[in-house]
Image (spheres, rainbow, N blue to C red):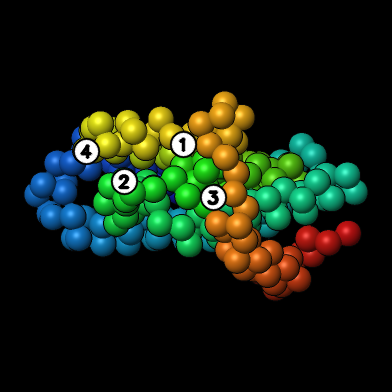
Amino acid sequence: MPSLILAAVAFLLLHLLVSGTTVRDRLVARLGEGRYLGLFSLASGAVLAWMFVAHRLARGEAAALVWWSVTPVTRNLQIGLMLLAFLLIVPGVLTRNPGAVGQSGAVDDPDPVRGVLRITRHPFLWGMAIWSAGHILVNGDLASLVLFGSLLVLSLAGAASIDAKRRRTHGERWAAFEARSSFVPFAAILSGRQVLKPSEFALQALIAAGAYLVVLLAHPFIAGMSALP
């Protein structure tokens, strides 16, 4: 458990105190954008792998604390939440997004708010937040709370950090993009600033549904347990 907690703290600090802050700006100025992204990705991937390995070891400890277990209701709710998460994550990866790494220039596109970005300008991170929350729902042990809780916090705080970073670097151009989109899913649509157009990401949604089914069926091999009732 100490290793998992240390990994989770390192993962959060790496992202919240470096990525999206003025520390990042200074590192980019010194190293260059490409070298910084390479080193940051390497460090982030290494710490993330450390977290998952430490989580698996911590769950096997005899003294692991468990506050709740999965029930038929929470299992079914989790299955639905995972579909929603995939419908945000996959289109979020496949859609050109001014908030994504290496795509900040998209803010100058004639129509930057398209497809899933009409729902939220951070679809991938909101999908990860829902994915993390769903796993907390069905995993009440301390190790899982540390792992998935860290990912949940980072997903939402990371989205806010991206907004702050883009405001510094893109000024009025990002402000215009923010005005036409929303941080919270569906807020821009409900306020009348956007209109949902499913046809713009229908193919991506089909790909997401296919990926969801594959992961659902392969869950015993991925996580060592079935996600189905």
Place residue 208 in its image quadrant.
bottom right
Q: Which of 141 and 120 is in front in this view?
A: 120
Measure the alpha-carbon separation of dots 4 and 2: 11 Å
Which of label 4 and label 1 is nearer to you?
Answer: 1
> Image check: 100 left or right of 168?
right
- In the rendered image, residue 16, in percent from the top left (x then y), is placed at 36, 37
> Image check: 175 left or right of 57?
left
- In the rendered image, residue 36, in percent from the top left (x then y), is placed at 21, 55
Residue 169: which disc?
4
- What residue is disc 3 on? 116
Secondary structure at numbered mark 1: loop
Q: Nearer the viewer, residue 126 or 75?
A: 126
- Nearest to N terminus: mark 3 or mark 4: 3
Circles 4, 1 touching at the beta carbon (< 8 Å): no
- What residue is disc 1 on? 181
- What residue is disc 2 on? 107
Secondary structure at numbered mark 4: helix
> In what quadrant of the picture does the C terminus appear?
bottom right
- In the rendered image, residue 152, in percent from the top left (x then y), is placed at 56, 41
- Nearest to N terminus: mark 1 or mark 2: 2
